[in-house]
Image (cartoon, helix red, strand yellow):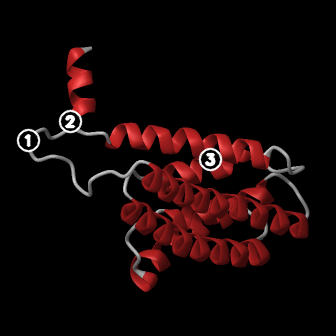
Amino acid sequence: MGAIRQRVRADLRGVHLALNVFVATSLLWLVLRQVEGLNPIWAISSMLASCDPHVADAFKNVRGRVINAMIGCATGLVFLILGGSRDWTLPTALATTAFLSSYIVRVPVMWRQAPITAAIVIASALEKHTKMASIHLGLRRVAEVLFGCFVGLFVTWLISKIWPLPESPPASAPVRP
C-alpha cells in the first residue's frame, strides 16, 4: 500500500482521471436515463475514451473522435442505405471506413473511431429493424456517442478549473505501470 500512496502523491493524474470518470459517468447516467429509449452505455464508453486529466489532451481526443465519428457515421449510413443488412455490408463498410480515415481524412487521434462508428450505425440493421428505423437508431446511437465525448471534455475542463494540475508530471517521480 505504501508504494501506491507514494505514486499517487508523486503524480495526481490518475486521481484526476478517476474523478473525471466518476463525475462524467454519473452525469451521463442521470441525464440519459431520463430520456426514453436512450442507453447511457454508448455515451459512457465514448466519454471514457475522451476523458483525460489535461484539457489539451482531452480536446485532441474529442476532436479526433468527432471527426472520425462523422466519417464512420456517413460511411455507415451509405452502406446501410445501399447494402442493408446483407452479410457483406459490415466487413466492407468497416474496411472502407478504415481506409478513408487512414488515407483520406488522416486525423490519427482516435482514427479507429471511424470504423467503430460505422459498426454502430450498421449494427442497427443487423437487429432486424426496417431500413428507416435502422437509420434512425444508428443516428441516435452516434448522437449518444458524441454527447459522451462532449460531456467528457466538459467535465475535464470543469475539474481542471476547480483543481488545476501541472501540465506535466514531476520529473523526479515518473509513474510506472
Residue for point 26% across, 23% down: 5
Q: Give the Cα separation between the discs numbered 1 and 2.
A: 8 Å
Q: Which residue is mark 2?
A: 10
- Reading the chain from its start, which is encountered first: label 1 or label 3? 3
Q: Secondary structure at mark 1?
A: loop
Q: Identity of the amino acid at label 2? A: Ala
Asked if one can make out residue 96 in the rendered structure from this viewpoint, the answer is no
SS at circle 2: helix
Secondary structure of the residue carrying tag 3 is helix
- Outermost residue toward the left in this view: 172
Q: Earlier in the sequence, mark 1 or mark 2?
A: 2
Q: Is residue 104 above or below residue 102?
A: below
Where residue 155 appears, as percent x and y from the top left, is 54, 53
Quadrant holding the C terminus: top left
Residue identifier under label 3: 44
Establish if 130 lies above or below 49.
below
Please state if 130 lies on the left or on the right of 106 as rendered: right
Could you tell me if the residues under marks 2 and 3 are in contact, i.e. CB atoms within 8 Å? no
Report x, y in % for residue 20. 50, 45
Q: Are marks 1 and 2 in contact (CB under 8 Å)?
A: yes
Q: Position of residue 23 (x, y in %)?
A: 58, 42
Res 174 → quadrant: top left
Label 1–label 3 contact, CB within 8 A:
no
Which residue is at a point 25% across and 39% down the rendered structure image?
Answer: 11
* Mark 3 Cα shell of 10 Å, populated few (<14), some (14-19), many (≥20): many
Which residue occupies the foreground of this view, 132 or 25? 25
x 26%, y 58%: residue: 167
Where in the figure is residue 141, as x and y percent of width and height? 73, 59
Q: Considering depth in this image, is 52 or 77 the residue closer to the camera?
A: 52
Q: Say which residue label 1 marks.
A: 172
